[in-house]
Image (cartoon, grey):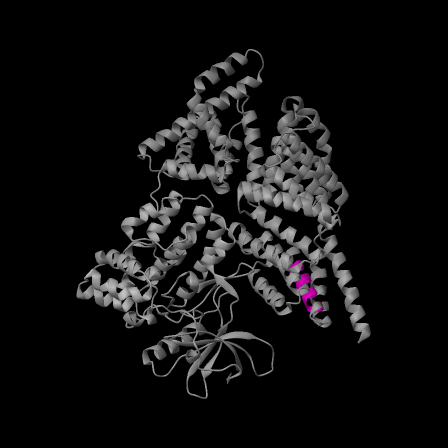
Amino acid sequence: MQDRDWARIAELYSQIMDLEPEARPAEIERLQLNPDERALLDKLMSPSQETGFFETGGAVSDQDVVLPTGTEIGNWRVRSVLGTGGMGEVYEVERADGHYEQLAALKRIPLADQDGLARFQRERQVLAKLEHPNIARLIDGGVGTDDIPYLVMERIEGIPIDTYVAENALTLPETLRLFLKACAAVTHAHGQLILHRDLKPSNILVTRNGEVKLIDFGVAGLIDEADIAEKSPMTMAFAAPEQISQGPVSAATDVFGLGATLVMLLLGEPPKPAELRTNQLKKLPYDLCAILDHALAETPEARYASVEALAGDIRHFLTHEPISARPGGFRYEAGLFLRRNWLASTAAIAVIAALSLGLAGTIWQAEKAQRERDAAIQERERLRAMQQATFVMFSEAGDAGGELDARDLVTKSANRMLEEFDDDPAGAAPVLHMYGELFYLMNAYSAAEPLLTAVADMQETQETADLIALASHDLANVLMRTGDVGEARRRLDAAKAYWQANPLDHQEVLLDSVLVESQLLAQEGQVAEAEARLTQALPARIAYSGETSMDTAILYTNIGVARMRIGDLEGAIEASENGRDAFKAVDRLESPDGLNTLNNLATLYHITGRLDEAERAYAETMETRQSLYGPSAALAVLLSNYAKLRILQENFTGAIELFDQAIPMAEEFSGADSPPALAARFGKIEALAKHGAIAAALKLAADTDALMTDPGLRAGIYGGLLNLSRGEAFLLAGDPKAARANLDRAEAILKDAGPAAGRHLAKIETLRTEIAAITSKN
């Protein structure tokens, strides 16, 4: 059948299947289909086409039940029947050998169906290769005494993903992040050269903890296996066109199934044929429509090349980055950039806004003010630099036909200014410095560094001295963030030396430099000096900016962090409360900086035992951050800290639920071995162990250990916390010897971590006391 016939067959199938079963034959006769259409519809409507490992296909009658309750098969005993169908029966079973308690799902197939038997044998081989947290695990398999083969799968207590999304009223970002877990499972299977072939909501289950489990590889086959296409069952509403037309299947077939599933999750209905889909998807954001159209393309070649490519575009959509499914262009790329960095983009927005409002008038005013005070000269030159940079960028965009992306545009313009810098350093330096600031705002530190270096290293004259000092300060900030602490210190000292020669003329920049200096001191191991430097700057900052200002609020917050670092928790609370009050006074408590202060305060209340205040602060901050900014690394940290509070409240189930949200979020936005992700993992290990799930806790500890491949990471505080969490789990498991060994390793690491590790070392001593008590009883 030609690809162009697919839409008609899909429409006919939907039309017929909407009827009661007894009315379908008459409708087929009324349609007067041609022989090819009739044959294909007959095949599609065959009961064997709709399969599922846990699906029943309707009520189970007595004659369907082959094995009565209590029947033993291998190491398993039947508890109840879950379903029957063309591929055999599925039972809930329990372990019968007495080694341990375990529930599972057992599937067997009658020998009479040779095609079904072949599929079943292949399923067992396929599933044995799959080991992924989002794929139902193969536990056992064999042949019963009646010579009927069986396999035993992990019993998933979950509901179909579309039901879960609807019942929990998930937001669009929450739905997409859940869907990404299914994509990860399919990507893993494809890496083993395994296709699923029947992806649909009912084969993607979600547990009560929000964990995705992909089930039913009963119709799967090896990617290079080409001879079973027309034997494979399918589900019409989610089947790719090549499956309907009995063509060869590939990874793109599963891409289609995932795309169709995502439509169901977002709209509550399967995708319509291509000619009707645009109207169907119009309620969704434009980029998401483009992603779905690409995934659901009629031909495999026109779809995403892999499931990972589909998942990548969804992740980019979530983080407001360009997607591959949509042609770019400067306006598109720049718009996404501003959405990603709406707060940090103030400087970039100022460039465009200043141009549109007429920089000429502003510069004229600056020139007039020059007669009143010298500071206006600097402002005038800065505005002229902004104007020139804007003209250069728009010129580059025009030369490229408007198709440069945002970063390419800035890069080309900056390179052009670097060339001009060689001929006229003093004239080009302000613009070059501004480009360095833009790259810094984009977190493109490697691009910012050479631009700022060029300005900082230019020949100093009376006209360039101020700009050189400012560029040196900004360069220090960049170098500190890239790990070059020594050079960052040299650059900062150079800027400060210039400013301190005339401190009254440079009060604001000297106060701003304190934040960078304190961070450098902390990175150099001088945590007490870092706190002292911030505290010493506070009176001057209040005198300059006022008690209630953003700058004062930010300084208070940094003082709180520094005091927490040296173990002065009460002092940290005082500073953080002052910061909170200052943010509130200027109506910026809901800004990212304000929310960071609230998060710090909640954590401080938590670790000092003020649990009721911590509960209120966590709840308020989490709700505000989630509603205003959505998922982020900061939200993951907040969820993790809130979960640790629930451990103290002995609400272990609630803690695990929060950790299950925090861990994937932290991994998505910070990386699997980042501090936020690792801290959440350590917390979950503790919650699982205290909840009695010792095996799960130790498995998570082993998985986390495998993630920490960086020797520096293992030798630092996070290596100590891994051993501490594992030691506590072994203690709760009743293995004091293993617990003591892990706690010894934790202590050896944490003793070198400074005051910040004090409360962890105190916990080790508490656990050792418990070990001693257990040992003395024995």
Count the numbered circles shown: 0
Could you say where residue 624 lies in the image, as x and y percent from the top left? Answer: 59, 41
Residue 571 vs residue 481: left or right?
A: right
Highlighted range, magenta: 719-731
Residue 323 lies within the magenta run: no
Image point (43%, 64%), residue name: 203
Majority SS type along the magenta span: helix
Residue extending farthest bottom: 145
Q: Is residue 277 above or below residue 394?
A: below
Could you say where residue 348 lies in the image, as x and y percent from the top left? Answer: 47, 31
Residue 412 vs residue 764: left or right?
A: left
Q: 374 or 213, which lies in front?
A: 213
Residue 720 lies within the magenta run: yes
- Quadrant into which the N terminus falls: bottom left
- Quadrant into which the C terminus falls: bottom right
Residue extending farthest right: 776
